[in-house]
C-alpha cells in the first residue's frame, strides 16, 4: 500500500484491516518513487501487543509499532516526530507537547471551547515537523495514539509549546538547554549513529528557526486564552 505522509511516499502493507482503514486517508496513487519502505509482521504486532496495557487492540498495537518505524525513517529527510497534540488555529499549527497523562489533549480541547470554528485538532499524538529551506511545516500522520484524530493535513508551524501542570496559567520562554532536553524526550530517540547525527542537525535547524514556549496551566478555559495571548498575539 502506498501512502503519502508528511510529503514522503511510504510503502507499507497493513497486517489488519482495521489499521488499513486508518491509513486509507493517506493513500497515494501518484507516480513518485518510494521514499520509505516499512515492514512489520503479524508476529511483531502480537509480540508488541503482549507488552502493552490490557485493552489495547491489535490495530492499535500495529499503529504503535509502525509509527515507531516511520518516525525513525523520516529523520534523514529533515523531519522529526514531536509527540504532541497539533492544534490548528487560523492556518497555523501549534504543537502542544508533554508526557502522556500531563494533559496536552485536554488543553487543546480548551482551545476548541474558547475559539470555536477558528481552531481544530489535526493530530492528537504524533504529528511530524518537516524542515525546508524557506519554511517549517507541521504534518498530520495516520498515527493517532488511540485518539481517533489523525487528519491528512499540513500547515506552517506556529510554535512548539511544552506543557506542565500548574494551579495558575503562565507562559515563559525556555532557554536552549531546556528546549533540547524537552524535545529529546518527545521525539524518536535511541537511534543509530547515522540517524543520531541527522537528528542533531534537525534539532539545530529547528532551534534556530522555531518559537518555543513552556505553558504551565490548569484545566480551565482561561488556560487557552492565556496561551493565545502569549503565543499567537
Image (cartoon, helix red, strand yellow):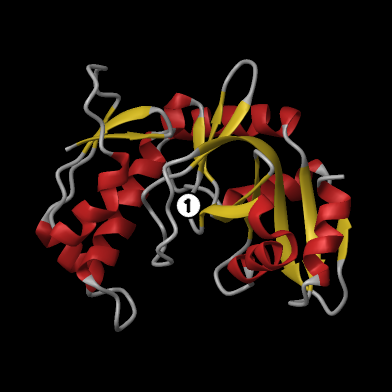
Q: Is residue 140 visible?
A: yes
Q: Is residue 70 left or right of residue 179?
A: left
At label 1, counting other C-alpha atoms closer than 10 Å, the crowd grade (few under 14, some 14-19, many 20 or more) is many
**Quadrant of the frame with the N terminus:** top left
Is 181 in front, or is 36?
36
Picture quadrant of residue 172: bottom right
Up-down: is 106 above or below 190?
Answer: below
Q: Position of residue 129 (x, y in %)?
A: 55, 37
Q: Is residue 81 left or right of residue 104?
A: left
Up-down: is 177 above or below 32?
Answer: below
Give the residue at the far front of this rendering: 117
State the residue at coordinates (41%, 43%).
Answer: 71
Q: Position of residue 148 (x, y in %)?
A: 40, 63
State the residue at coordinates (50%, 47%).
Answer: 127
The residue that disc 1 covers is 126
State the residue at coordinates (39%, 67%).
Answer: 146
Is 85 in front, or is 195?
85
State the residue at coordinates (44%, 59%).
Answer: 149
Amino acid at each position: 500500500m502506498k501512502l503519502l505522509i508528511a510529503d514522503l511516499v511510504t510503502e507499507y502493507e497493513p497486517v489488519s484491516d482495521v489499521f488499513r482503514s486508518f491509513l486509507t486517508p493517506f493513500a497515494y496513487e501518484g507516480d513518485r518513487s518510494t521514499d520509505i519502505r516499512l515492514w512489520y509482521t503479524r508476529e511483531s504486532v502480537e509480540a508488541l501487543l503482549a507488552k502493552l496495557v490490557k485493552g489495547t487492540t491489535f490495530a492499535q498495537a500495529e499503529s504503535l509499532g509502525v509509527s515507531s518505524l516511520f518516525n525513525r525513517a523520516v529523520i534523514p529527510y529533515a523531519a522529526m516526530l514531536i509527540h504532541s497534540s497539533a492544534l490548528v488555529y487560523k492556518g497555523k499549527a501549534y504543537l502542544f507537547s508533554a508526557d502522556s497523562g500531563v494533559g496536552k489533549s485536554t488543553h487543546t480541547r480548551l482551545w476548541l471551547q474558547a475559539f470555536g470554528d477558528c481552531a481544530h485538532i489535526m493530530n492528537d499524538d504524533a504529528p511530524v515537523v518537516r524542515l525546508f529551506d524557506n519554511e517549517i511545516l507541521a504534518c498530520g500522520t495516520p498515527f493517532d495514539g488511540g485518539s481517533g484524530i489523525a487528519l491528512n493535513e499540513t500547515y506552517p508551524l506556529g510554535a512548539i509549546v511544552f506543557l506542565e501542570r500548574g494551579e495558575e496559567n503562565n507562559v515563559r520562554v525556555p532557554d536552549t538547554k531546556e528546549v533540547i532536553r524537552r524535545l529529546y524526550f518527545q521525539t524518536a530517540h535511541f537511534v543509530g549513529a547515522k540517524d543520531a547525527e541527522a537528528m542533531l542537525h534537525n534539532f539545530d535547524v529547528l532551534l534556530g528557526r522555531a518559537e518555543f514556549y513552556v505553558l504551565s496551566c490548569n484545566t480551565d478555559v482561561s488556560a487557552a486564552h492565556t496561551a493565545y495571548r502569549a503565543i499567537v498575539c
